[in-house]
Image (cartoon, rainbow, N blue to C red):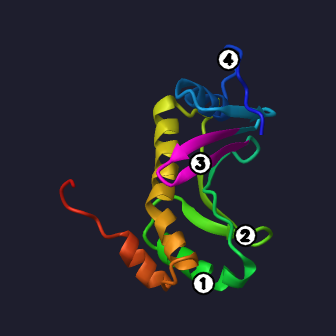
Amino acid sequence: MAFEDDFNPPPPGGSTPIDTISDWFHAQNWPHERIGEEEVVAAAQGAWGQYELRGIWREDDRVLQFLAFPDITVQQTSYAVLYETIGLINEQLWIGHFEMWSGNGSIVFRHATLLESQERPQLDMEMADALIDSAIGELDRYYPVFQFVMWGGKTPSEALSAAMVETAGEA
């Protein structure tokens, strides 16, 4: 994926939610690429590896969809246990959800935001920060659960319990 090197701000008065997300990525110096007027893709370093982030704006529905992909691909033989794992994880989430795309076994964290307004739908930088931070935070938080199930031989319940153990203090 080729990312833009130069920042091209949107025209005055033409700001869309994708413009705001693109501006946020630019402010963080994260490599990103605009795909038309309705999509932006970025790469971000998470606690467990590189994540692909995508913002997709659906003007007709006034919905901003934000997707975050960890570098995890599930083999078809593991689909059933991963669906169970995702179900247990999603019970813990307040905003957004994990899913597995059956076509290619990709794990994704997805969150949609309805941006209704009489004028122009607005997404400010603070909202973009919260949206992106929460997606990366959930990937970082639950990545070990997927690892424990796929490569550690744990059941989904065991993996969730093991990954959610928080240490007290500092080493």
Residue at (48% x, 37% y) in the render: 129
Mark nearest the camera among 4 and 2 is 2
Mark 1 to mark 2: distance in Å?
12 Å
- Check disc 3 and report the residue beneath it: 50
SS state under label 1: helix
Residue depicted at 70% across the width and 19% down the height? 10
Estimate how packed mark 1 is, as few (under 14), some (14 to 19) or many (20 or more) residues with alpha carbons within 10 Å. Answer: some
Q: Amino acid at mark 4?
A: Pro
Pointer 4: residues within 10 angstroms few (<14), some, or many (20+)?
few
Of the image marks 1 and 4, the number of the one nearer the N terminus:
4
Separation of residues labelled 3 and 1 (CA atoms): 24 Å
Which is in the foreground here, disc 4 or disc 3? 3
Q: Is residue 139 visible?
A: yes
Which of pointers 4 and 3 lies earlier in the amino acid sequence? Answer: 4
The residue identified by callout 2 is 105
Q: Quadrant of the C terminus?
A: bottom left
Residue 81: give its label. 1
Question: Over which residues does the magenta segment extend?
Answer: 41-57
The amino acid sitting under disc 2 is Gly
Element carrying mark 2: loop
Q: Which residue is mark 4?
A: 9
Of mark 3 and mark 2, the one earlier in the sequence is: 3
**Which residue is drawn at the image coordinates 51% and 48% (left, top)?**
46
Q: Residue 111 location in percent, x, y?
A: 58, 54
Identify the residue at the far front of this view: 171
